[in-house]
Amino acid sequence: MIRIVLFLVLIALAAAGSAWMAEQSGDVVLSWGSIKATTTLPFFMLMLGITVVAAIFVWAMLRGRAERVSGYVIEASRAMAILERSSPEAAAWWHENAPQHVTPKRYLVFHESVCQVIDA
């Protein structure tokens, strides 16, 4: 609940800041040696935001936190329902030790090497 409220507050602040930024008529001048670049404040802030998001993504990739995997995606609650039928102990472990990962609208990815495709 707190996450949702915090998220909504952040969205409201971002919207208010964006509206304020769009109304500003100032310019930003960047100079480096003999090179000079002039742009509007809203465009500069947009480019700065895109640069920050890209830098965060690249940093995550370099640190190994973001990983591209091949596998099968399934909604976590559906996976837990299947697991409860075949192994109630394992399902209980998930609910006890990792409840944040098995809530509705969360997804799990199972690597191709550990899956077997069956006809339903």
Image: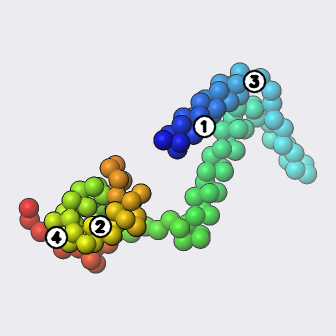
Question: Could you give the CA–CA distance between mark 4 and mark 2, rounded to whole angstroms?
Answer: 12 Å
For marks 1 and 2, give the CA distance: 35 Å
Give the residue number, with chain letter if any, for mark 2. Answer: 92
Q: Which residue is mark 1?
A: 10
In what element is the residue under mark 2? Answer: helix
The type of residue carrying mark 2 is Ala
Whichever of labels 3 and 2 marks the residue nearer the N terminus, that label is 3
Residue, disc 3: 24
Identify which residue is drawn at 34% across, 49% down.
105
From the viewer's perspective, tell me whether residue 97 is left or right of residue 33.
left
| Residue drawn 28% across the image and 78% down it | 113
Q: Alpha carbon of mark 1 to alpha carbon of mark 4: how far?
A: 42 Å
Give 28 or 21, whichever is nearer the viewer.
21
Tell me which amino acid carries mark 4: Ser
Position of residue 27 measured from the top left corner of the image (x, y, whole percent) = 80, 30
Residue 63 coordinates in the image, percent (x, y): 59, 71
**Which tag is nearer the camera, tag 3 or tag 2?**
2
Q: x, y percentage for residue 112?
A: 28, 73
Q: 61 above or below 46? A: below
Mark 4 vs mark 2: which is more N-terminal? 4
Labels 4, 2: front one = 2
Q: Earlier in the sequence, mark 1 or mark 2?
A: 1
Dividing the picture into quarters, in which one does residue 70 lie?
bottom left
Circle number at residue 86 = 4
Amino acid under label 3? Gln
